[in-house]
Amino acid sequence: MIFLRSSPLSIILFVLLFAINNNSKANIPNESHELTLYVMPTMYPLDWSSPARLYKTMKTCYVKTIGLTDHYLLGHMAVKLESPLLDKPILIGQASGSTSEKTQLILKEKIGYGILGATLTGRIETEEELAHKIEVYARRGKLAFIKYRINTEAMQRVLTFIEKYTQKFNTKNAACDFYGGAFWPRYENEGGSCTSFGFSLLDVINIVPPTDYKWKLDLKIPQQLIGGRFNNNRKVKFSTIKKADAWHNGEGSLNKDFVKYSVYEPSIIFDWVLQKRRDTIPEYQAIDDDGVPGLYIDKTSVACKSNEPLFLQRAEPNLFIDVYLKMNGLSDKKN
C-alpha cells in the first residue's frame, strides 16, 4: 500500500535504484579486473640508431649510475594484477640474475652484441623488491603506467598463463628461469625479458597495442658484432663496435650475416605515456596514482581468443634461441 500511495517520481526512482543495485552486482567482476604495466626508463637516454651510438650511450648511462642503488640499467617493466579472482593484488616482473654472468659474457667471452640475445639466469622478482623499486622510481619521477580494464575471461587466461610460465617444464627448470632479449614467453619453453613478459600477458588476451605506437625496436644485428658461443668463439673488440655506424640493412642470410632482434623499449613507452597524457585522444584516459602519471583504457569488450593455445611454436629460426635450446638439451624437441 505504501508503494501505491507514492508519487510517480518516487516510483521511478525506486525502480531505477532497484535496477542499478542489481546491475552493479553483476558488473563488479568485469569492472574490477585490471592489468597495469609499470614502465621505468633508463636513468639516462639510450640511442639505438646505430651499434656505435648504443654502445656510447649505454656506457655513459652505466658510468653515471654506477654508484646509484635501486635502479635498472636498461630500464624495466613490472605488472600489477587486481581482480576479485585474487585474494590480493599481484605484483610481478621478470628479471635476470646476478651481473657476474653478463660480466663473463661481455669481458671474458667477448660476445659483443650477442649480449642482447644471450640467455642468462632468470627469476621472478618478489613483490617486496618490486614495490620498493616502484616507490623509488616514483620519487625520481621515472615511473609511468598504463592500466588496462579487462574482462573476467581475460584475467583468468592471464593468471593461467603465469601459472604455466612459472611451472617446471622439465625436472630442473621453468621458463621463467631463463632471461634473454631474444625470448618471447609465448613460445613454448622459452623464457623472457622484463618487457617481453609484460607484453606476452597482453598478447595472450589479444590486446597488444598496434605497431604504429612504435614501442618496439626491430633491428638486424650484423654477424661480425656477435661473438663467443654464437659465432665460433669469435672475440668482438669494443673498437669494432665503436666503428659500426649502422645496423645491418642490406642483403644477406638470416642467422648467418645478421640476426633479427626485437625489443619493447621501456624508455620509449614511458615517453609515449607522458606525451599521450598531453594529447587529446578518446581511447585513453589520463589518470594519476599517488602522483604517478598514467593512462587508463577499457578493453573489456575485446575477445581474448580463448581457443588459441597459451603457448605457441616458434616458426622462424633464431641463432640465439638455437644456442639456448642446444645448451639446455631442448634442441631435439619442439620449442
Image: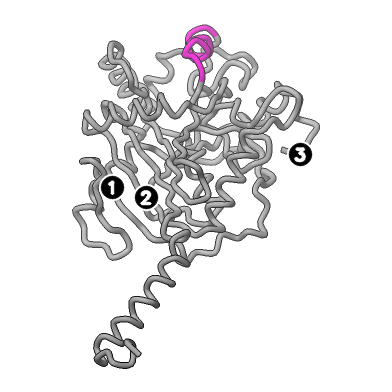
- Of callouts 2 and 1, the N-terminal one: 2
Q: Considering depth in this image, is 163 or 286 the residue closer to the camera?
A: 163
Q: Name the residue under label 2.
A: 147
Residue contact between numbered discs 2 and 1, judged by CB atoms under 8 Å:
yes
In screen coordinates, is 14 left or right of 195? Answer: left
**Quadrant (top left/top right/bottom left/bottom right) for the N terminus:** bottom left
- The residue positioned 34% from the left and 26% from the top of the image is 133
Q: Distance between the residues labelled 3 and 1?
A: 40 Å
Decide: is 55 above or below 196.
above
Quick one: SS at disc 1? strand
Asked whether the viewer can see residue 171, the reply is: yes
Label 3 or label 1, whichever lies nearer to me, is 1
- Check residue 4 for magenta coloring: no
In percent of width and height, residue 110 lies at: 51, 12
Quadrant hosting residue 143: top left
Main secondary structure of the magenta stretch: helix
Q: Distance between the residues labelled 2 and 1?
A: 7 Å
- Check residue 104 for magenta coloring: yes
Q: Distance between the residues labelled 3 and 2?
A: 35 Å
Magenta part of the protein: which range? Answer: 97-108
Q: Considering depth in this image, is 85 or 306 the residue closer to the camera?
A: 85
Quadrant hosting residue 37: top left
Task: Rate crowding at label 1 as few (under 14), some (14 to 19) or many (20 or more) other CA atoms within 10 Å.
Answer: many
Q: Name the residue under label 3.
A: 334
Label 3 or label 2, whichever lies nearer to me, is 2
Task: Rate crowding at label 3 as few (under 14), some (14 to 19) or many (20 or more) other CA atoms within 10 Å.
Answer: few
Decide: is 41 above or below 102.
below
Q: Mark 1 points at which residue?
A: 294
Task: Rate crowding at label 2 as few (under 14), some (14 to 19) or many (20 or more) other CA atoms within 10 Å.
Answer: many
- The residue positioned 37% from the left and 37% from the top of the image is 266
Identified by mark 1, the residue type is Gly
- Of callouts 3 and 2, the N-terminal one: 2
